[in-house]
Amino acid sequence: MRVPSVPARRTVLACGLAVALLAAASPASADSRPVRNRTGSLVLIGGALKENNTQVYGEIIKRAGGPRARIGIITAASVPESQDPHAGDPDLCSNSACNGAYYAELFERHGAADAQWIPLDIDHVADADSDAVVAQVDSMTGFFFGGGDQYRYVTTLLRGDGHKDSKVLAAIRAKLAHGAVVSGSSAGAQIASGPDMVSGGESYEALRDGSAPGYFDDPTRLGYIPRGGFGFLRSGLVDTHTGAYGREGRALRLASDTGHDRVYALEENTALVVDRPGTGREHMTVLGPNGVTVLDLRDARAHDSANGWSLRRARYSHLTDGDQYDARTWTPRVHPGKQPLVPADTTPVPANADVFHSAADPDGTPYSFRTTALALASTRAQNSATATTYETGPRFAVTFTKGRGFAAFTGDGTGARTVVGLRIDIAPR
């Protein structure tokens, strides 16, 4: 079935930071017992969640009560049956109902006691205020929001210009506050955002043209919803499919334009697990085969000129499986199973003329931005590297620099896997 629609002194400093980061870490729990969090938790996936990802599905189920887990599936970001020409074909359909059934079957296959579709979509907006649907929500111990278009979640579950909760969303919010897990993939992760939730856009056009509030028919235009999504995670902006679709540029531009100091950029088939969201003890763990990038703009400065937009002194940290992050202190905590990397490789960083994996480039490759970052972290041949956009008019250059605060870690001793504090500068050429 289809998946519904990611020099010596420097070395000493880096190793010193590495020791500090590792000392602060604690191993990711492998305990399969149910997790009890008084304030609930989030499991946010960067999209393209594979059916066999037992690590992520198992984490959601564990947090929902383990073998007693009851998962409510919300797929209102999908088109309704009325807009799906294949609605009657279970092998080809891609609408809210059949996607709901798809995820319900998957959660039960992975060990949930029960998984049910919550019957909501843009053709049944009134049902988000149905007492019967609220009762169904109240019987659940966890929730999963599927992918699609996050704006459909806005129109289905929020009300009016003030974005007030529908009864169903209020019930889900109450369940989260009392210990339930709320999870989602792609649009289902982005809708957890607070103010200025991204609504669309591509990196090159974002750097060239900037952002604008609203929802646009042009998929390349960087748009955002000022009032945001559901506001489950407010300590940073959220973006998804980041490396696979080359969205690092749009994430940096949107954060800069809207005054946000941090972005959680989620990669595909990988989850950011958030404990105690919205509290002073908000804490995160990465689970999965790819990673989560934290973009730090606290020291970043943007500038507009006749030549184009530029950004200086942003920071890039790429965290991978088992790494943790303390949102309050802005501190990555690298899993103790990883070791500080002291590069022995003298290979130069390969040239990169499509840093944001442009859709216009027939030879483009996913995870292009990350590839350059990890290659620089893994070599001692150079301390900076520059990659460019595929598009011109202007062409933008992205400079990656190892400097103060930078550290890299390896899992097998051959190359960088986790990177902390790599400086990023963007400027037109």
Image (cartoon, rainbow, N blue to C red):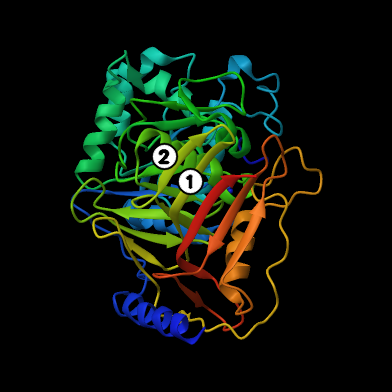
User: Which residue is tagged 1?
Assistant: 311
SS category of the residue bearing label 2: helix
Residue at coordinates 60% horizontally, 69% vertically from top-left? 376
* Picture quadrant where residue 325 is located: bottom left
Query: Image check: 2 left or right of 221?
Result: right
Which circle, 1 or 2, is nearer the viewer?
1
Q: Which of 416 and 28 is in front in this view?
A: 416
Q: Which of 225 and 203 is in front in this view?
A: 203
Q: Where is residue 264 in the image (x, y as percent from the top left)?
A: 42, 49
Q: Which amino acid does label 1 sit on?
A: Leu
Q: Quadrant of the C terminus?
A: top right
Residue on which the image places disc 2: 256
Label 1, residues with CA under 10 Å away: few <14, some 14-19, many ≥20: many
| Residue at x 48% of width, y 68% of height | 419
Gap between marks 1 and 2 measured at Cα: 8 Å
Mark closer to the chain start, 1 or 2: 2
Asked if the residue under mark 2 is in contact with the one under mark 1, i.e. CB atoms within 8 Å, the reply is yes
Would residue 406 be visible to someone looking at this image?
yes
Q: What residue type is labelled 2?
A: Ser
